[in-house]
Image (tube, helix red, strand yellow):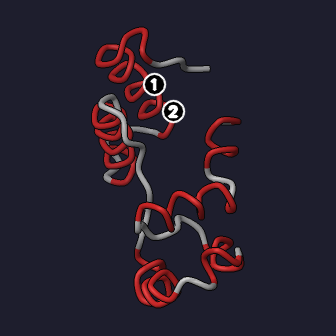
Amino acid sequence: MKLIAIASEPRINTLHAIKSAHLGIGQSQSAVPLYANDRWATGATERLLPYASAQPNHTGFSPFFDAMWNGLEATWTGQKSAEEAVAGAEAEVKVALGNDIIIR
């Protein structure tokens, strides 16, 4: 989590966003001068950022997301308790990703 916090720090993420023509991932970026002074970024942010989200660019993300979604859906529909859904998602992820994931 510490690495994610560092990598998504507004100034660092703003540099990436502007240099690669991407939107920022957080409202706090709109206050960073590099972002705030970029005409495309500010225009696009006003219209698109409220609907945007970020996902990790990693081949193991899909099995992780699928397990998480399955667990959420199972709790929403009453098929499993939250505890059962978490245990099931953890088991699914361990099978799919093996040593590529650390669960604490």
Q: Position of residue 11 (x, y in %)?
A: 69, 61
Kindly indicate whether the residue at mark 1 contacts the one at mark 2 (C-beta within 8 angstroms): yes
Residue occupying image coordinates x 47% and y 32%: 86
Residue occupying image coordinates x 70% and y 36%: 2
Relative to 7, residue 87 above or below: above
Q: Secondary structure at mark 1?
A: helix
Q: Give the amino acid type for the residue marked by disc 2 in the picture.
A: Glu
Question: Which quarter of the figure has residue 27?
Answer: bottom right
Q: Is residue 41 left or right of residue 63?
A: right
Image quadrant for the C terminus?
Answer: top right
Relative to 67, residue 19 above or below: below
Of residues 67 and 100, the one nearer the viewer is 100
Relative to 3, residue 15 above or below: below
Q: Position of residue 25 (x, y in %)?
A: 53, 64
Image quadrant for the N terminus?
Answer: top right
* Number of residue marks: 2
Badge 1: residue crowd in 10 Å (few <14, some 14–19, many ≥20): few
Relative to 24, residue 54 above or below: above
Q: Give the amino acid type for the residue marked by disc 1 in the picture.
A: Ala
Q: Position of residue 88 (x, y in %)?
A: 38, 26
Q: Report, in whole angstroms, how far the alpha carbon at label 2 lies from the one at label 1.
A: 6 Å
Q: Is residue 5 left or right of residue 86?
A: right
Of residues 71 and 98, the one nearer the viewer is 98
Check disc 1 and report the residue beneath it. 87
Residue occupying image coordinates x 32% and y 49%: 73
Check disc 2 and report the residue beneath it. 83
Q: Is residue 68 left or right of residue 29?
A: left
Residue occupying image coordinates x 48% and y 62%: 19
Q: Secondary structure at mark 2?
A: helix
